[in-house]
Amino acid sequence: MNSFQEINSIIEDFSFFESWEDKYQYLIDLGRNVPTMDTCLKVDKNKLKGCQSVVYFSSIANQDGTIKFLANSDAAIVQGLIGLMLKVFSDRTPQEIFDINLDFLEKIGLDEHLSPTRKNGLSSLITAIKNIAKQKLN
């Protein structure tokens, strides 16, 4: 599925739920499906700065020119946000990553329903993803 299809699927999934309690539960469920990072990657240099929760973040360059992102958190909703971002950004080319329109976050209501600290953490994750894509383009 390309990023556009993935984003449309996410928007559709979120619109299915009426309450934010259900949407948060959906996020938590997304987080449960995120593969656990190998413990050798859970080191200080892979800790994402700007997050209140502990978030480990790494990437792998795939043979086909795409980038696979790996991330884990100790907090359920943050892990769900990671799951959401991995669905959108992981296994894409650097150019595809830059072309992704993030207005879907507003469409699904996350901009209004995340605490300031979670918004900062999400922003840090997106920045880290884009920085790695930028390195691969250069």
Image (cartoon, grey):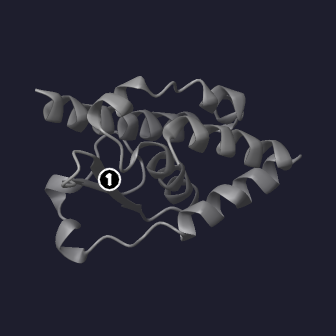
Q: Viewer-proximal residue, 87 or 63?
A: 63
Q: Residues within 10 Å of mark 1 (few under 14, many from 20)?
A: many
26 sits to left or right of 84: right
| Residue wearing tag 1 | 69
Outermost residue toward the front in this view: 64
Q: Is 60 in front, or is 78? A: 60
Q: Which residue corresponds to the image point at 33% horizontal and 32% vertical from the top-left?
A: 127
Hey, which quadrant is residue 71 in on the image?
A: bottom left
Residue 106 in the image, given as x and y percentages of width and height: 65, 26
Residue type at the position of mark 1: Phe
Image position of 113 with respect to 71: above or below? above
State left or right for residue 87 relative to residue 39. Answer: right
Which x, y percent locates residue 102?
Answer: 53, 27
Camera sees residue 55: no
Above or below, 131 relative to 62:
above
Q: Is residue 15 left or right of residue 125?
A: right
- What residue sits 31% from the left and 70% below the top? 37
State the SS at label 1.
strand
Q: Is residue 42 left or right of residue 55?
A: left
- Residue 133 in which image quadrant: top left
Screen quadrant of the C terminus: top left
Query: Quadrant of the rendered structure where residue 38 is?
Result: bottom left
The percent position of residue 126, horizontal first and vertical second, equals 39, 36
Residue drawn at the location 36% of the way across and 57% of the way down: 54
Q: Nearer the viewer, residue 58 or 73?
A: 58
Where residue 89 appears, x then y in whole percent? 41, 43
Q: Residue at x 70, y 28 (%)?
A: 107
